[in-house]
Structure formats: C-alpha cells, structure tokens
Amino acid sequence: MITTDPAPANPLFPLFVKAEELSMLLIGAGPVGVEKATGILTNSPGCKLVIVAEMVSHDMRALTERFPLMIVHERRFEESDLDGVQILIVAINNREYSKEIREMAHARNILVNVADTPDLCDFYLGSVVRKGDLKIAISTNGKSPTVAKRMKEWLNDVIPDDIQLLLDNMRVIRSRLKTDFAQKVSHLNEITSAMVKDNKKDE
C-alpha cells in the first residue's frame, strides 16, 4: 500500500534544468532585470538568454561583454517574442501589464516568473550556493528573499572550498565499485558519513 506524507509547509518541487537547452526570454533590463539575468547566466553561462526592453541599462549592456551568447533587443515587447519560448521572466514595474503578458504566455504553455510578485509566478529563482559541481538552491516559498540570502552566506562559509576534490574522488570510487546497486549505495554512504561526523564535532 502506497502512503504519502502530509503536505509540506513549502509545496514547491525543486528542479534543476539545463538552461542552455531551453529557450528563455527576459522582459525588462532595469536593476531587477539585471539581477535576474546575472543569476541565470552565472549559473548557466551557456544559456542563450534573450532580453527585450524599451530601455536597456548600462549594467545590462555590461553583461553582454561577460556573456556573449546573450541577445538584447532594445524595443517594446511584442507577443511574437514568445514564439518558441519555454521559460519567461518578467521584470517590469507594472503589475497589470505583467499579468497581461503572463496570460499571453500561459496560452502558449510557457512557465512564467514575474519578479517580486509571488502570486503571478509559476516558479521562483532562489538563492544558489555554488562550490564546484555542488549546487544548492534555497527557497522560502517566496516569503523572504532576505532569509534565503543569509542561508546562502552561511552555507558558503560551512561548505569547504575543496569540496570539488571530494566530488571527483567519489566519482572515481563509484566507477570502480563492481558490486550491485544496493551494496554500492551502502559503501558510498559509509564513506560520506565522515563528513557529517566531522561537522558535528565542530559544533
């Protein structure tokens, strides 16, 4: 018999996507748009992010030097901009117009994030901790970006900078294990349990 746990306080399902394989559009190129673009491109520099905005800030233009795959159109948004788009981020200071754009996108089955407007979002862009191949996304279900930011700072301090060495070694060890799946998982769990024990000693 299959049982399910009670609904969690935060019902969001965490998901990592290959942004470089998706068509992503960002509407808006002010400070909030720059923040969103920076977060996306820092994590997925191979993403061909398209920006559409009537006014493009200096900071957004500076991003194109760091991420040459960006495409920037300095003009008003047109519904045809949604052709082929899979993920849309709206970063304009106009709730009603944002809602209108969202409805256009939903008619095309496009996932939408409207900056700083949780009730209009299909997904959130959380704070992200990056240490080599280790990546941790943090969500407060849209309640407090500030808390997410502080958690990011704490995790950056706690996670050792040489974590990549462990990840590389674990990959080698896993590839050399010739046992069945259950035994392999048990062996790898035994090896990594030392990480938890060491952290508890430090506390």
Image: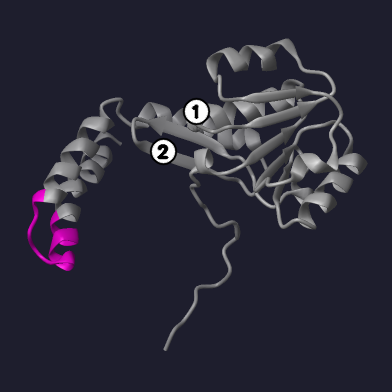
* Prevailing SS of the magenta stretch: helix
Other-residue count near label 2 (Cα within 10 Å), few / some / many at <14 / 14–19 / ≥20: few
* 139 to the left or right of 110: left
C-alpha span from label 1 to label 2: 15 Å
Q: Residues within 10 Å of mark 1 (few under 14, many from 20)?
A: some
- Tell me which amino acid carries mark 2: Lys
Relative to the observer, which residue lies in front, 102 or 147?
A: 102
Q: In the rendered view, does 81 fall on the left or right side of 127?
A: right
Question: Which quadrant holds residue 156?
Answer: top left
Task: Tell me the residue at 19%/60% (across/down).
Answer: 185
Looking at marks 1 and 2 on the same chain, the residue that comes earlier in the sequence is marked by 1
Residue 82 numbered mark, or none: none
Kindly indicate the quadrant of the structure image that contains residue 196. Answer: top left
Q: Helix or strand or loop: what does disc 2 sit on?
A: strand
Residue 137 in the magenta stretch? The answer is no
Tell me whether circle 1 and circle 2 mark residues in contact (CB < 8 Å): no
21 or 113, nearer to the observer:
21
> Which corner quadrant holds the C terminus?
top left
> Mark number for residue 135?
2
Part of the protein shown in magenta: 176-187
* The N terminus - image quarter: bottom left
- Looking at this view, name the residue that lies furthest to the bottom: 1
> Residue 56: image x %, image y %?
77, 17
Q: Which residue is mark 1?
A: 45
The image shows residue 168 at horizontal and vertical percentages of: 21, 36
Q: Is residue 147 above or below residue 103?
A: above
Q: Secondary structure at mark 1?
A: loop
Q: At which x and y percent is residue 25? A: 69, 37
